Each structure stands twice: as structure tokens, then as C-alpha cells.
């Protein structure tokens, strides 16, 4: 179960970076008024100077939001409540690479979850992983309908979504469903969860938020998600059919992935078609994906273009060249490195599998193969969030991150805030989850077989 624990912690890192990255907080639980004001003001200042995606939130008056948050943070009773308000404030920017990190002490003291996990499908929350001891009470595949008597969608909107930073609506919904049972309130608190089983039976179950610090044997549906699979295996290679080779790239954080790819290239060269699975790849180092692609193309590939705010005080005083939406900065522009093909590149029909979890450097990977004829993207729209993070230290031991770089396609099309759309879109269905059908992979195999000769 160590791999499951690692997978869950990795997922919470994505959803709630505040929980796992911050330094230890001060011994005093309550910050001074001066520290509270300084922390909020630091965020307001640095966001105004450095945030790259004000264009994604044209309706947001950030100065007014800052003013409205001042009395809220001054009214907080402890460091935990203070950081909750900071998280709410930063979530207004609607960016998956921007947010606030709880101090470690507050995370350990307040944050926990029950031994049950759900994911979103067709607008519903479906249970995909649960403690073996609870499975007889709430079966896998059950639909969640309420939490503590509150209708589930209302629970998400009131209790969960305001604190989650996300660039797209579909990622916000998914992240909120996954975090729906988690608590950043009282350790080991209880919740009442209402559900409908796959057979149609309604029920309620009392759950204790105590799973973080105990060993649990989970039962899970065999369906591709960070909850049910995790991404502890960063690279996987296997034959699915005659001439059809499957390559899973589950992360770009580990530089050994490229070495493993090179070591496997003698096998890859034998494939008539490739299926590259990046559905569980939340990003990492974009250079890893670029290096891999250099062996799979015979033409040079252009990466994303980018902009970043650049503050020139005299320009602001003169009121000229104020191009960006918050009217404080000029813009510095650039582009990702061009990929040049290796002499031994293996170019065959290649099908790339994507999901709502595909993000950051994995999306940069997809930008490179845009309009490349032998690449076809199959699956869901991606997470829709990438960029370069600026990290800040906050009073009390927490941290914040701000996305400082706006990325888009070479031709100017946006993908942050919407996600990269696949060539063949496949909607996630409740029935496929319950019956453990990987329809995205099945469709890719069908498409790949069409390209295999001498079958």
C-alpha cells in the first residue's frame, strides 16, 4: 500500500500544493496584525507585478478584491483561518499554477480525509476507490448525492471550489470532486455522505476523516486516474497488438525517463504504430518531452510562444506601452526551443492519449506536435494550465506561487484556460468507469490497427 499512499499524496500535491511544500510554521498559532497585513499585501503586490494571466479573468477587479479581503484576514482567529482566506483570495485569479501553500504545522493539525475517493463523470461524483472495510456499506461505482445533508453540487460550490485554484472549469470540477471529502477544518471530524449505489439503492454512511496517518487496504476500480493508478511508474513499454507499441509517459519530473526511452529505442524502431499515453502526466521538465519528440519526427517542431510581464516605471508614469490587462506592465516575449530531429528518428503513425490530468509540461509536449500529420490526439481536453512559477515566503511559514509566464500556440491560439482539445474526443462515461472499460485506449488501438500493414 506504500505506492497507493504515495499516489494519494502526489495527487494532493497537485490539488493542494499548500499542504505539502511549506516550511514549518512559527510556534505561535496566531499571527500579528502586522504580519497578516504584510502577507496579504505581499501577494497583492507581487501578483500585480508578475501574474501573467490577468487576460483570463477580465471581470476581476483585483484591487477591490484586495481591499475586501483586508477585514477578512484581520478577523481570523489563527494562522489556519488566515491561510484559508489567502487561498480564497488567490483562487480568484483562476490559475492552476497560482496559489497559496499552508504552513506544514497547520496542514498536519487541520487537514485529513476519509478512506474514500471519487472522480467526476457526466457531472456526477463516482466512487472509484475505498477502504476494503467500507466497501460493503458503500459499493464502488456509487454516485455521491450529498455531504452532511447538503446537496453535493451545493457542497462543492460552497465548501470546496472557493479554495481551489484552477485554470479551467473542467479541471476545477474534477479537483473539487476529488477533494470533496477532505477537511481543512477539524482533525478526525466526521461527515455523513449520501449516495446511490450502482444497483440504484440509496444510502448514507458516516465517515471519519482519519485516513492520512493510518495504513489502509484500498479496493479500486481499474480505471485510469491518479486515484486508481497513481503515477509511480513513470515509464512503461509494452506491445498491445501486432505492430502496435504502447508507451506510457506518466511524468516529466524524472530525467531518467529520457534515458529509459533511449534504452528502449531498439524496440520502438520495430513498431509500425505508437500509442503514447500521457493521461496521468501532470508535467515536470518540458525538455524531457522535447528530447523524446526529437526521435519521433523528421521535421523541426515549434514550441509554444510566451509572454511575461515587464515593469518599466517610466513607461507607467508616461502611460504608454501598457499592453497587458492589468495595465501595469509592458510585455517581454519569447518562444520555447525549436526541436530538431535526430538522424535515426522513427516516424510512424502516433496516437497520443490525453485526459483532464494532462497538464503543464505535458501540454507543452502537445503544442510541439500540433498540426504534425502523423500525430493524432485521442481522449479528453487537457488540464489547461502551464507556465513559470515564482515562489514567495509568507508570514507563519507558508508559501505562495504565482504564474509569471503566459504560454500559447505559435500561431497565437490559447490553450491555457481551455485545455488542448483532442483530434478524437472521447467523453468520460459513468458506465465505462463502473465496468472498468478504458475506451480511450480501446479507440487508440482501433485507430492504430488501421495503420498496421501485413496484419
Image: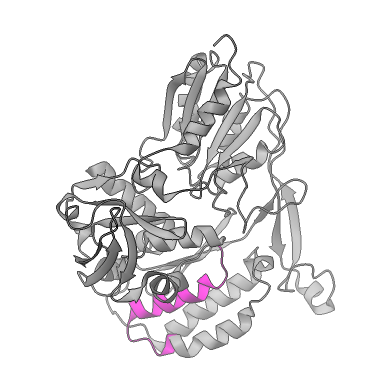
Residue 23 in percent (x, y) is at 36, 63
**Above or below — where is 146 with respect to 129?**
below
Instruction: Identify which residue is drawn at 38% across, 63% down.
Output: 22
Q: Quadrant of residue 142?
A: bottom left
Asked whether residue 16 appears in the rendered view, the answer is no
**Above or below — where is 264 with respect to 80?**
above
- Residue lying at the far front in this picture: please name it: 200
Asked if residue 142 is among those painted magenta in the image, a careful observer would answer: no
* Number of numbered markers: 0
Residue 171 in percent (x, y) is at 50, 58
Asked whether residue 222 appears in the rendered view, the answer is yes
Q: Quadrant of the C terminus?
A: top right
Magenta segment, which residues? 73-95
Q: Quadrant of residue 18?
A: bottom left
Q: Is residue 16 rendered to the left or right of residue 306?
A: left
Most foreground residue, 216 or 398:
216
Residue 407 in percent (x, y) is at 67, 53
Main SS of residues in magenta? helix
Q: Is residue 141 rendered to the left or right of residue 441?
A: left
Q: Quadrant of the N terminus?
A: top left
Amino acid at each position: 500500500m506504500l505506492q497507493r499512499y504515495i499516489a494519494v499524496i502526489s495527487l494532493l500535491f497537485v490539488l493542494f500544493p499548500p499542504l505539502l511544500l511549506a516550511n514549518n510554521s512559527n510556534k505561535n498559532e496566531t499571527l500579528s496584525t502586522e504580519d497578516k497585513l504584510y502577507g496579504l499585501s505581499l501577494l497583492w503586490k507581487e501578483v500585480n507585478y508578475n501574474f501573467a494571466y490577468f487576460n483570463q479573468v477580465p471581470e476581476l477587479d483585483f484591487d477591490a478584491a484586495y481591499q475586501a479581503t483586508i477585514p477578512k484576514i484581520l478577523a481570523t482567529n489563527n494562522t489556519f483561518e488566515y491561510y484559508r482566506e489567502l487561498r480564497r483570495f488567490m483562487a480568484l485569479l483562476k490559475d492552476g499554477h497560482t496559489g497559496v501553500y499552508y504552513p506544514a504545522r497547520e496542514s498536519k493539525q487541520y487537514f485529513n480525509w476519509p478512506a474514500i475517493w471519487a472522480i467526476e463523470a457526466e457531472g456526477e461524483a463516482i466512487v472509484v476507490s475505498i477502504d476494503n472495510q467500507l466497501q460493503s456499506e458503500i459499493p464502488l461505482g456509487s454516485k455521491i448525492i450529498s455531504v452532511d445533508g447538503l446537496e453535493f453540487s451545493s457542497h462543492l460550490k460552497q465548501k470546496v471550489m472557493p479554495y481551489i485554484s484552477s485554470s479551467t472549469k473542467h479541471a476545477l470540477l474534477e479537483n473539487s470532486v476529488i477533494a470533496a471529502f477532505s477537511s481543512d477544518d477539524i482533525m478526525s471530524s466526521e461527515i455523513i455522505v449520501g449516495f446511490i449505489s450502482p444497483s440504484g439503492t440509496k444510502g448514507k454512511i458516516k465517515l471519519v476523516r482519519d485516513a492520512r496517518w493510518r495504513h489502509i487496504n484500498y479496493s479500486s476500480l481499474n480505471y485510469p486516474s491518479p486515484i486508481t493508478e497513481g503515477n509511480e511508474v513513470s515509464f512503461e513499454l509494452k506491445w498491445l497488438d501486432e505492430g502496435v507499441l504502447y508507451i506510457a509517459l506518466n511524468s516529466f519530473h524524472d530525467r531518467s525517463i529520457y534515458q529509459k526511452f533511449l534504452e528502449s529505442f531498439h524496440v520502438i524502431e520495430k513498431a509500425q504504430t505508437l500509442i503514447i499515453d500521457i493521461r496521468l502526466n501532470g508535467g515536470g521538465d518540458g525538455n524531457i518531452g522535447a528530447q523524446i519528440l526529437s526521435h519521433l519526427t523528421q521535421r523541426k517542431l515549434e514550441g509554444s510562444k510566451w509572454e511575461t510581464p515587464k515593469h518599466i516605471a517610466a513607461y507607467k508614469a508616461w502611460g504608454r506601452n501598457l499592453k497587458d490587462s492589468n495595465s501595469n506592465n509592458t510585455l517581454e516575449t519569447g518562444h520555447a526551443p525549436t526541436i530538431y530531429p535526430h538522424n535515426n528518428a522513427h516516424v510512424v503513425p502516433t496516437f497520443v492519449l490525453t485526459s483532464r490530468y494532462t497538464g503543464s509540461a505535458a501540454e507543452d509536449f502537445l503544442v510541439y506536435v500540433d498540426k504534425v500529420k502523423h500525430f493524432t490526439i485521442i481522449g479528453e481536453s487537457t488540464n489547461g494550465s502551464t507556465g513559470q512559477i515564482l515562489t514567495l515566503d509568507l508570514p507563519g511559514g507558508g508559501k505562495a506561487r504565482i504564474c509569471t509566464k503566459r504560454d500559447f500556440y505559435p500561431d497565437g491560439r490559447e490553450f491555457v484556460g481551455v485545455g488542448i482539445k483532442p483530434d478524437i474526443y472521447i467523453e468520460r462515461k459513468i458506465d465505462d468507469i463502473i465496468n472498468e472499460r478504458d475506451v480511450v485506449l480501446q479507440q487508440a488501438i482501433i485507430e492504430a490497427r488501421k495503420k498496421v500493414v501485413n496484419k
